[in-house]
Every structure is written in C-alpha cells, then in structure tokens.
Amino acid sequence: ISSSLTSLNLGLNSITGTLPPELGRMKHVVQLNLPLNDFEGTIPFELGRLLELKELNLTSNRLEGTIPRGLCDEGRVNNFVQFYSCNAILCPAGTFHIDGAANSQGACRSCPKAKDSLSKLLGRTTCEEEDFLIGDMDGDGRQSPREMLVLFYMQNSGLTWGEKYSSWINTAVTNCELPGITCVGFEIAKIDLSDAQLCTDQNGKQVPPDQCRGIPSELALLSNLEVIALPRRQFLRGSIPTEIGLLSKLRYLDLSHCPEMKGPIPTEIGILNHMKVLNLANSHFTGTIPSEIFQLTQLEKLHLSANHFTGTIPEQVGNAKSLREFMISRLFLKGTIPKSIGKLIAVENFELYGSSIEGTIPKEIGKCSSLKRLDAFNNNLTGVIPTTLGQIESLQIIHLKKNQLTGKLPEEIGNLKFVSWIDVSSNILSGSIPPSYGNNRMIKDLRLGGNRLHAPIPSSLCNNNKINGGRTRTYGCDAILCPLGYYDATGYANDSNGGCTKCNDDKTTIYLGSTSCVELRPEDILSMFYDVMRGELWDESEVHMWKSKTGICHWDGVVCEEDGTLVSLSFPLTQAD
C-alpha cells in the first residue's frame, strides 16, 4: 500500500477477509471509505495513527471488537466525534443506526439482546423489530422537544452558528434557556435564528449539502410552536416540510431572503388557521401559489415576491379577507387579476410588478376600500385604468408603468385626497390630462411620459412647484411632459439632460411626453387627429379600419392615388369634406 495515497474508496463491493494493518502506512490518507463489504475481525490499531485522516466509513461490514482510540480524537475524523466519541465512527456492539454510526440524525440505539443474533457486530444499520427514530439524540427510543432542537443544530452545522449558540448542544441547558428560543408556559413558542450563521464553516463559507439539511420534518413535534423566524440565512438549504401542517398554533413563518431554500409551498399550510404572516420573499421556492393559502382568514401579510412561482393568481384570493399586504412581484405568473380581488377590503399594499399578468385591471378593485398602494408595473395589462380607483379614498400610490393600458386618464383619480405618486408612463394612454390632476395639491410625483397624450396641460400643474421634485420652477410645463418636437427618456424635463432634447430636423414627435423622435408619417398624423377628435366616439360604420395596421388608403374616408399618395379626407360624421 502506497504511503503517498490520499484517498481510498472501495465501498459497495463484496470484499472479504480482514482489514490489513498495512493500511496504517498510508500516512497522507485523507479519505478511507470501505462500507458495505464483508470485512471481518477487528479494526487494526494502526488506523489510529493516520493523523491526516478526515473521513472514515467502515459501516455495514462484519467487524467486531473495539475502535482504536486514536480515531476518536475530538473532531479529527468527523465533527460528530466530539458529541458521540467512538460511536461516531461505528455504533458499538448491541446497538444500531440507519447510517451505522452516530451523526446528525441521532445517536446509536440499543438493540435488545434477546432478539439479536448479531449483537457482537459494530456499525450495524438495522435491528430486528426495532425502528430507528430520526432525532433520537440520546438513543433512548424517544424524541423530546430538546432533542428536536439538537437535531436542528447538528443537521445545520451548529458548531459554527456563533458562540452565542454554543449551549444548544448541551442538553443540561433547558429549552427555555437557549438563545433564539422563547417559551410560553415552559413550552417552545418561538424559534428565532435570524442572527445565527446557519450552514457555514469556520471561515464563513457554505458547507456541503450533507452538513445542511434545512428544517427537519421532526420539528413539527413542537406542537406549541407559534413563530419560526429564519430570515436572510443565505446558506440555509432544503424545503418546507409538509409536516408543517401539524403546527396548529403557527402564526408567523419567515424564510425570506434564503436563496438556497427551494421546492413548493406545501398545501398543508392552508390548515394553519392562526397564520398571520407568511414571508417567503427573495428565496428560490417553486411551483404554483396554492389556493389553500387563501383559506387562512386571519392571514395579514403574504410576501412571495422574487421566487420562481409559476401559474396564475388563484381565484380564491378574495377569501383571505384579513390580508393587508399582498406582495407577489417578480414571479413567473401569467393569467389575469381575479375579480375576487375586490373582496380584500383590508388590503393596503397590493404589489404584483414584474410578471406577465395580462388582461384588464378589474373594476372590482375599487371595492378595496383600504388600499394605499397599487403597484403593477411591467406586466402585460390591457384595457383602461378603471375609474373605480377613484372610489378608494385611502389610495396614495398608483404605479402602472410599462403595460399596454389604453383609454384616458381617469379624472376621478385626480380627485383622490391622499394620492401623491402616479406613474402610468410607457403605456398607450390617449387624450389630455384632466384638470383634477392640476387641482390636486397632494400629488408630488406625476409620471406620464411615453403615452399618446396631447395638449393642453393644466396650467395649475405647470405652476405647482412641489411636483416632480420642484422642476417646474426651471422647466415649467416641460417638467410634466416634453412638448412636441422634443423628447426625453423619461418623457419629461429633468436635470440629468438639462431639460427635454430637441429632435433632429428630419424627425419630430407627435405626442406630448415622447421618449424618442420619429419620422412623421401620414398614419401618425391621422392617428393623432383621431385621438384629439375623440375618434373612439365616432360611429364605427364611418371610421372602419382607422388606426389598424393596414395602410391608410384602406381607412374609411381616406382617398389615395394609385401610388399610395393621400389625396383627400372625408368625414361624413362632421358633414365636412
């Protein structure tokens, strides 16, 4: 056997015989893995001299005797030696463990001699008529709440959580004395590890997956648990166990900003009737948003933004009538906003930006009488901005930028007493700014650029020195919308470019608040004429094909030469040729 060998892995074979003492010559070996073979006899004491050995697995063989003490030095061969001594190398005779050695799953458990014909073997993984209990950290065949905490500690590299948490492994310290634990009547009610360095090594780096198993399903045995707070644990792995549905008193679950947490939201969460806060934002959860969540009539905050959820917003959303914060932005959702959204009379913050939501904003949203913030920018919303938004007296922020909304700016929105921030830029809105927007002295930010708006701009807006950062002092009406023939990336004058920029001589703009210049075409001029003259009210039989993608020579009332040159216009509606 070469003394320069650093790794020897011969597991899952059918090797027989004894372990040769010559293995002790491998002075530089780091890994020695020989499980699931048929080795017999004892473990050579020479193995205890392998000072560079960090990983040893001899389980599921037919070894007997004792384990060389040199292998049981604290923390040398594996981290669990300091907790279980030699039992972390191989379970002693008369005991067993599903992995053949004590580890983060629990201690070695006794196997009754009367039922065990193989009681002399070390590292056994089964025992007749006895089941191994994950979380049985002392091997007594039971799972206590204290053992559940030790299980969580050991399965998530507890030794490096920080000095504050070193007492977790000491079972002489009671549950209620542990840092991060809050008790009610001597029962564990809260686990808050928001400052523990979960799943890190001594250098603050991420540990391998087998050293970070996440939230154990056995934690559900803590039947009085009300709060689980594990936010911003960047290396915490795993998923939400389905057994969470057994925590009938749970009212607060925070796994936000845990980018290694994955998997679906268990539907069992829908039976946690006391749940008030569910925060999974900025993690890596997948699947669809379970409709069962909206059965939780006491739920007040639902934060699911910045995950990998797909599907649609469940129709049952309106059943969560206590919901105050509903945040589902930056997901992969499609479909429409359900009409049942109008049943959320307590919702104050509705955020769903940055997805692919389509269809119209339902008029029923006007029944959300407590709504303060509507943020649905960067979706595929179509149709008009519902006038029913003007019924929500509490509304302060309307953010609908980057959609495909059409129609007019609702005058009703300008009458809202508390609205301070309106951004409907980069849509297809037409018409002019209603006077009510100029009369409203609460509006501080008004972003309307990138639409199809035309004059006039209410003079009261141009003279409002508190709007858009007070830029009206310098730029006047241009601080509301760039004039014709000028443009800006935002659609209004700002200090970064010294005001709106004039188009080159060969280009212009056809709407106020343009974000770029265009070469003016007859189609553009007629489309603008249509908007200004409120063409949507014209008799459809008289304006067939107007604003369609067909050439203007096919628009009703437009006469062209054979070469496509426009000759005349006829508008029977106005009796003018």
Image (cartoon, rainbow, N blue to C red):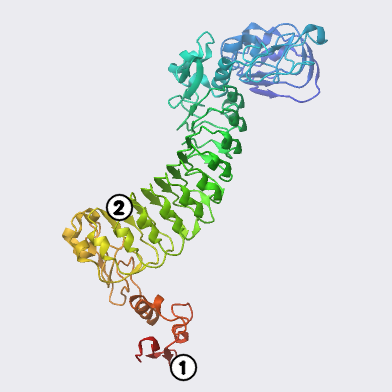
The residue carrying pointer 2 sits among few (fewer than 14), some (14 to 19) or many (20 or more) residues within 10 Å by Cα, namely many
Q: What element carries label 2?
A: loop
Residue 295 falls left or right of residue 364: right
Q: In this view, does 366 lie above or below 61?
A: below
Q: In this view, does 208 lie above or below 310?
A: above
Point out residue 538 in the picture as x, y percentages from the top left corner: 40, 80
Point out residue 226 in the picture as x, y percentages from the top left corner: 50, 26
Point out residue 145 in the picture as x, y percentages from the top left corner: 57, 17
Q: Is the residue under label 2 in contact with that under label 1 (CB below 8 Å)?
A: no
Q: Is residue 401 visible?
A: no
Task: Specify which label sits upstream in the sequence, 1 or 2.
Answer: 2
Nearer mark to the viewer, of 1 and 2: 2
Q: What element carries label 1?
A: loop
Residue named by callout 2: 419
Q: In this view, does 537 lie above or below 185?
A: below
Specify the label residue 562 is tagged with. Answer: 1
Point out residue 115 in the picture as x, y percentages from the top left corner: 81, 10
Residue 368 falls left or right of residue 472: right
Residue 490 falls left or right of residue 254: left
Seen at 36% across and 90% down, the residue is 575
Tag 2: residue type?
Val
Q: How many marks?
A: 2
Q: How far apart are marks 1 and 2 (CA)?
A: 54 Å
Q: Looking at the image, which is closer to me, 478 or 532?
A: 532
Specify the label residue 127 is tagged with. Answer: none
Tag 1: residue type?
Glu
Tell me the quadrant of the picture where the N terminus can be found. Answer: top right
Seen at 61% across and 20% down, the residue is 104
